Amino acid sequence: MELTEEIKRLCQKKKAIILVHNYQPGEIQDIADFVGDSLELSRKAAETKAEIIIFCGVRFMAETAKILSPDRTVLLPDPEANCPLADMITSEGLKSLKAEHPDALVVSYVNTSAEVKAESDYCCTSANGIKVIDSLPTDRKIIFTPDSNLGRYLIEKTGKDLILWDGYCYVHHQRITLEGVRRAKSLHPEAKILVHPECLMEVIESADAVLSTKGMCEYVKREVADEFIIGTELGIIHRLSKENPTKRFYPVSEEAICESMKLTTLEKLERSLREEIHKIELDPQIVAQARSAIERMLAI
Ligand code: 13P
Ligand code: SF4
């Protein structure tokens, strides 16, 4: 309790805002000024007047906040909180793929480093991927990086033939399986199945809805159903249960845990804010180039 009070006091004194992703531990979500998915968090970062943004999530999310608010201090409470999916592509790798397809447009999932975004024409998130791809001219080739599962889902939904990078998220690709969905459904036959588009196609095909984390929160609120099978990272169940106390949530797998997301603690948050450590620092040239890709996405 004391730690929570101290964080709130520091936020007020330093004009700081706490932005928190839906996968963060419950006690971090509970102290947030705003909890959301990647798209909402980037919008919040773009519009905030706060002097410090303390970003509880993973590095690419904090970098996106810095790209959109370069004059603000952006802190990542644990500097080791990297997204393994984002680390599956480097700007060098993307440059080689671009060299093979010089006339292609490049759409990068927001789960990429600032350097990869700087090599991209557009960004997208799981919430707006279909819209972004649909908005592109039909006569241009499109490279999509780095998540191949989201890429295949976008091909299916938009009918466009994307050139894919071979990346994946270990939480969604390896720990959320069709077998897990079937097991959960046999135990809870009335439950609606919600999955994230980073899951394998066979998992996606078994679902009632394929949604970003924000999409799942909205779906659960408006549906009359009482039970839901959740095919994404476990952290979201804290928020779903808090906002819908009469509804029941069953994870596809108890092992669907993103270790990087769980590195944030109240202690690290307090220290990072007090000492203003673990600042996101980016090359201004990279910021300018990456910003265009994010702004093109936000404009769609
Ligand atoms: P959302 O944008 O749906 O919150 O997803 C982010 C993410 O990292 C999924 O693994
Ligand atoms: Fe990255 Fe997967 Fe963790 Fe999301 S859940 S932050 S994609 S490793």
Image (tube, rainbow, N blue to C red):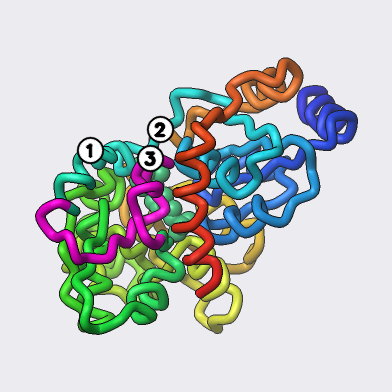
Q: Residue at x 30, y 81 (%)?
A: 137
The magenta stretch is 99-122
- Please, what secondary structure does the residue beneath circle 3 have? helix
Q: Are marks 1 and 3 in contact (CB under 8 Å)?
A: no
Displayed-image quarter of ligand 2 = top left
Which label is found at residue 82? 2
Mark 2 neighbour density, 10 Å: few (under 14) some (14–19) many (20 or more): some
Write down the quadrant of residue 15 in the picture. Answer: top right
Q: Label 3, on which residue?
A: 115
Q: CA distance from mark 1 to mark 2?
A: 19 Å
Three-letter residue code for mark 3:
Glu
First along the sequence among labels 1 and 2: 2
Q: Are marks 1 and 2 in contact (CB under 8 Å)?
A: no
- Please, what secondary structure does the residue beneath circle 2 have? loop
Residue 104 painted magenta: yes
* Horizontal side of residue 157 vs 260, given as left or right: left
Given residues 236 and 163, the one toward you in this image is 163
First along the sequence among labels 1 and 3: 1
Q: Label 1, on which residue?
A: 92
First along the sequence among labels 2 and 3: 2
Q: Is residue 74 above or below residue 240?
A: above
Mark 1 neighbour density, 10 Å: few (under 14) some (14–19) many (20 or more): few
Q: Residue at x 54, y 66 (%)?
A: 298
**Residue 8 horizontal/vertical position (percent):** 83, 33
